[in-house]
Image (cartoon, helix red, strand yellow):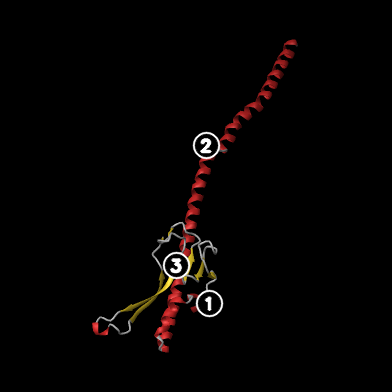
């Protein structure tokens, strides 16, 4: 009888030990699964670096396309003014007053447009690139130049004056008489253009 009791006690102790050991076994079995689903510090740094590089490339391209759109808009306004200049010249010819052509050189080209651009800032004396906000057209009352001041100018290289702007003016081209007997004859007008005062580079 005592042997059976001792055997039962031994069996109970073994069951308790087994039960106590089971939770630790389960935890150890699950631990590798949890670590496999997470990110290590190195992996996190790599992901952040890739995202930062992609964002930098994206922002660079956005600025590039904004600059190209600004340049296209500026060239479009200049083309519209050239068309308006041609119409002004045609009206002068119809009136038979060729001397009025010189008036076009001094006039503000914005006056020839039926509707001025929204980014036209007006007329100023003692103009500098800081006089008005960038991205606007402005007329210099001193030089009689119509000026555009770029807003996004990362790829803009100014002319000889070194200033961050583009100056336009009206150019009247004349052809002198070829014959010596006609040296006193009036010069013949060959063209009238609205063009930059000096070359610039804007890619």
Element at badge 2? helix
Element at badge 1? loop
* Of labels 2 and 1, the one closer to you: 1
Q: Residues within 10 Å of mark 3 (few under 14, many from 20)?
A: many
Asked where in the image residue 179 lies, by quadrant, the reply is bottom left
Residue at 52% x, 62% y: name it: 134
Tell me: 72 left or right of 25. Answer: left
Distance, label 1 to label 3, CA atoms, is 21 Å
Asked where in the image residue 92 lies, by quadrant, the reply is bottom left
Q: Residues within 10 Å of mark 1 (few under 14, many from 20)?
A: few
Which mark sits nearer the N-terminus, 2 or 1? 2
- Which residue is at the front of the view, 123 or 19? 123
* Of labels 1 and 3, the one closer to you: 3
Residue 58 drawn above or below residue 46: below
| Residue labelled with disc 3 | 167
| Residue labelled with disc 2 | 42
| Residue labelled with disc 1 | 115
Q: Position of residue 46 (x, y in %)?
A: 51, 41
Residue at 49% x, 62% y: name it: 150
Element at badge 3? strand
Q: Position of residue 147 (x, y in %)?
A: 47, 68
């Amino acid at each position: 009888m005592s042997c059976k009791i001792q055997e039962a006690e031994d069996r109970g102790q073994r069951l308790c030990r087994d039960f106590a050991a089971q939770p630790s076994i389960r935890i150890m079995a699950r631990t590798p699964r949890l670590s496999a689903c997470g990110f290590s510090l190195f992996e996190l740094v790599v992901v952040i670096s890739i995202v930062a590089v992609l964002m930098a490339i994206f922002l660079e391209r956005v600025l590039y396309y904004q600059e190209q759109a600004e340049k296209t808009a500026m060239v479009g306004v200049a083309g519209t003014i050239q068309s308006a200049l041609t119409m002004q010249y045609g009206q002068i010819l119809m009136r038979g007053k060729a001397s009025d052509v010189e008036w076009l050189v001094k006039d503000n080209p914005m006056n020839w447009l039926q509707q001025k651009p929204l980014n036209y800032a007006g007329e100023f004396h003692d103009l500098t690139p800081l006089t008005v906000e960038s991205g606007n057209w402005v007329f210099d009352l001193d030089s009689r130049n119509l000026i555009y001041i770029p807003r996004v100018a990362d790829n803009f290289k100014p002319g000889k004056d070194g200033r961050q702007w583009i100056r336009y003016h009206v150019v009247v081209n004349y052809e002198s008489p070829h014959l010596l007997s006609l040296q006193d004859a009036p010069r013949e007008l060959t063209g009238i253009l609205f063009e930059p005062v000096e070359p610039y580079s804007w890619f």
